[in-house]
Image (cartoon, helix red, strand yellow):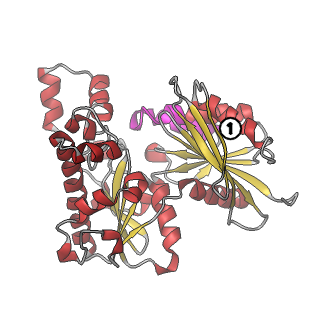
Amino acid sequence: MSATDELILAVNSGSSSLKFGLYRNPPGDCNPGLLLAGGASGIGYSNGRLQIKDASGKTLLDEAYQLNSQGHALKEILDTFERFGHGQPGSIGHRVVHGGPHLREHQAITDALIEKLQAAMQFAPIHIPAAVALIRETEKLLPDARQYACFDTAFHSTMPETARHYPLPQRLYDMGIERYGFHGLSYESIVVRLGSSIPERVVCAHLGAGASLVALRHGQSIDTSMGMTPVGGIPMATRSGDFDPGVVLFLMRTEELSADQLESLLNRDSGLGALSGGESDMRLLEECVAKGDKKARLAIEVFAHAVRKMIGAYAAELGGLDLLVFTGGIGEHSAAVRDWICDGLDFMGITSGDPALCGKVRVLTSEEELQIARITCRLRQQG
C-alpha cells in the first residue's frame, strides 16, 4: 500500500453484532478497495464470536470471543489489523440508524452532532444510545482518526410531503413525528450498483431480520414502508410492522402496559416469532414448513402477503414497474420466499417459480459497509 493511501474503517453496528469493512483508498479517489471484512456476533452473550476474511473471501479468523460491548468488539477487531499486515484507519464511518428531525445528511461527527443525537434519543431509543456509546469509545481507541456519521434516514430525504406526513395534527409534525424511512445505506448501495442502467420505476425490497421496501423513481426514494421508527412497515423477525393503532390503546387500557412494555412487545415479541410460536429465523421457519408446521407456514405467508401488497402499492404509486430488486439476508438467499412473494404478480410481468430468472426481477447483494466507506471518503475529501 502506498504511504499516501488512506485506510477507511466502515462500522455497521447492530443490537448484538458489529460488522466492519477495512478499505484502502488512494488519494484523490473515492473508490475504496476492500482489505478486510467481518464482524463480531453474540455481543453481550456467552456465545460471542469474531470472524474476519480478506478481500478474496478467505477466512483469516473465526474464533469464540467473550465480548461485553460493541466498544469491546471494536477494540478486538482493531487489534487484529496489525496481525494481518494493516495499520490503523485514519477515517471511520459509522452507520447511524436515526438522526431525528435535525440530522438528515451524512456528515462529520462533532460535539454538536453528538448533542443533537442525544436530544433525538426518543426517536430510536434502542439504536441511538448504542451509536453514541460506540462513537465515544472509538474516540478513545483512535483519538487521531476522523469520524463520520452515515445516516440510514438520509437516503429518504427526497420523499415528497405526501409520503412523509402522517394524518396527525400539525403540532405533532412540528415535533418531528413523520415518516423517515430506514435501510437507506443498503438502498444507496443498490442504486450505485445499478448505475446508469437503473430504470425509472424500481421497487427494492431489503428483507432480513429487519425488513422494508422502497419505491425509487430515477434512483431517488419517493416512498418507503418503515415510518418514524424501524418498527413500522411490513412484519419482521420480531417487530410488528404496521397495524391498527387502536390495538395499542386497547392494550394500554386492558393490560395497563407501560411504554417500555409496549416497546418490548412491538420490537422483540412480535413479527414472525409471534406468528410461528417462537421461531423468527426465516431459514428455520422454512425447515419447519417442510415438516408440516402450520404456524411456521402462517408466519411466512403473512410476511410474503405484506411484501406483495407493498410491491403492488408502490407499482401503483410509480405508475408501473420496470424492476423489482431483492436484497438483504432473506431477499438474497431465500428463493422460496421470493417465490411466495411473487406468486400472484403475473399481471405485472413477474412470474413465480424462480422470480430471479425473470427479466424484471434481480437479486443484488447489499453493500452497506462499502457504501459507508464511499460516503466517508467523500466527506473526508470535502474537508
x%, y% of residue 117? 52, 38
The one nearer the camera, 162 or 234, is 234
On the rendered structure, is 272 left or right of 198?
left
Query: Main SS type for the magenta part?
Result: helix
Residue 222 image offset from top left, x and y in percent: 35, 65
Q: Amino acid at mark 1?
A: Ile
Q: Image check: 359 left or right of 140? A: left
Q: Residue 243 colored magenta?
A: no
Residue for badge 1: 77
**Residue 57 showing in the rendered view:** yes
Residue in the foreground of this view, choosing between 209 and 196: 209
**Residue 332: x percent and y percent?**
41, 59
Crowding around mark 1 (Cα neighbors within 10 Å: few <14, some 14 to 19, many 20+) is some
- Name the element at disc 1: helix
State which quarter of the image contains the N terminus.
bottom right
**Magenta highlight range:** 111-131
Residue placed most toward the observer, 128 or 1: 1
